[in-house]
Image (cartoon, rainbow, N blue to C red):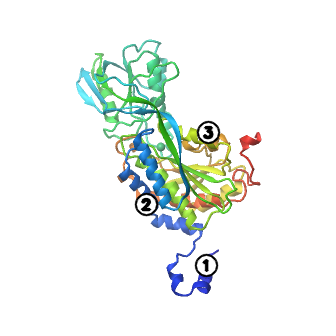
Amino acid sequence: MNRTMTALAALSLAFPAQAKTLPAPMTLEQAADDALTGDKVAWDFVEGITTEVGPRQAGTEAEARGRAWAVQWLKANGFKNVAIEPYMMPTWIPGEPGRAEIVSPFPQRFAVAPLGTSASTGPEGITAEVVMFATVADLQAAPAGSLKGKIAYVSNSMTPTQDGSQYGFAGPTRWVASGIAASKGAVATVIKSVGTDNHRNPHSGGTTFPEGVTPTPAGALSNPDAANLERMFKRAGGKPITMKLVLTPQDLGQTESGNVVGEIVGRNPSLPPVLIACHLDSWWQGTGAIDDGAGCAIVAAAARNVGFAGQPLRTIRVLFAGAEETGLWGSKAYSAAHVNEPFAVGLESDFGADRVWRFDSNFRETNPALHKRIALAVARFGVSGGTDAAGGGADLNVVRDQKGALVDLQQDGTRYFDLHHTPDDTLDKIDPVQLRQNVAVWTQVVGMLAGEATSILTGGPVPTAPPMMQGK
Ligand SMILES: [Zn+2]
């Protein structure tokens, strides 16, 4: 129904007094445009969860409080079928604030944070000589046993990029260096933070130890402290540099975590739903504002706005995944439980709150008409149509496992890795104007997808089962 028809209907049915008090039904385009200028829902979510819950370390009671908060919020905002889907996961907690101290030749303290799955040094700490490597490849090339009794340090740096692609280049320093160093006899590993800021904030995040390698203590130095350590190597004249490292994380064994879901129920609930995801957990240092309170705020606000433009054809399901940061436990559990339930398409928001600049899908070639229609519809928000094949985010395992349709709304990541996994991941870093642009773009795209009667992936009839169940 267009605006003129709506107005005429209102005039004929309820003229005059009541019609004025009823909000006029709006088109999807109007709902998206309204979000751009006036959305308060996403801000309400991220302001609320960072204030009332704060950090939400996976598997802990803080994450459970986050789930309870999200359930209440979804119900209060008109979502149906709101539920927690629990699962068990191995839980690691960071312990006391870490300490890294150069003992000699230039004694001073550095800012350090433990990396997820790091072992403990014990409260007395470990004191050992530091051996520096420029890259993970250099560390990999070190002879077997050559790091016995040493602390390995990797100095690889990261630079900011709009698309965040430098994370793929710098990330392995955090993801795998400690495991490689441990396999060569190192007693501990420290890395330069995988981050792009110059604050004295270490960036945490998960690391891994390969099967058969006993985990060792592993920490990230803040970037200015890492630079200081590198200068020490230049000035030490070959004298050993000795560090005392105190990291006291703990493994709590299996604890309960959970995914939170809620729906805007569609007119035809037998059609596969649109799945929009984010993650509810965060690392402990900040309050999980950009990672990923903002993502949950954006997807929830978009779903709600689509509902304001009239009941969508397909159901829109929000998935607030648990325990993404420590190993995608929520995403894996959701796929295990729901892989046989067909989904129309999956989208995720997990890259902060800065503006969306490009739309990508994985159906540009198989359903070019729909791809083009969406690209045209988001152009008014400054979003270009991309040619990369969307891969979906970490919490969309279920859709990837089904080989289903995926959309990526690429956000500006220039600032993201200044804040990512640091104490600076707090509400004040969210730009409300850019947050609203996200909600507007998401409202437009999710609304269009939820209005599609045919298969998103092919434009053909809706399959009765996911491709994987049909042997494709
Ligand atoms: Zn995240």
Q: Is residue 352 visible?
A: no
User: Which residue lies at the image location 31% right of the left edge and 20% below the top edge?
Assistant: 126
Task: Give percent across and percent down for residue 81.
Answer: 57, 55
Residue 6 badge? 1
The mark lying in front, picked from 1 and 3, is 3
> Disc 3 on helix, strand or loop?
helix
Q: In this view, does 26 lie above or below 248?
A: below
The mark lying in front, picked from 3 and 2, is 3
The residue nearer to you, when weighing 93 against 36, is: 93
> Disc 1 on helix, strand or loop?
helix
User: Dot 3: within a 10 Å radius of its alpha carbon, few (fewer than 14), some, or many (20 or more) residues?
Assistant: few
**Cα gap from disc 1 to disc 3, whole angstroms:** 45 Å
Q: Quadrant of residue 375?
A: bottom right
Task: Give percent across and percent down for residue 278.
Answer: 51, 48
User: Which residue lies at the image location 49% right of the left edge and 52% below the top edge?
Assistant: 296
Residue 336 badge? 3
Q: Mark 2 points at which residue?
A: 433
Q: What residue type is labelled 1?
A: Thr
**Cα gap from disc 3 to disc 2, whole angstroms:** 38 Å
Task: Give percent across and percent down for residue 409.
Answer: 56, 51
Lower position in the chain sequence, tag 1 or tag 3: 1
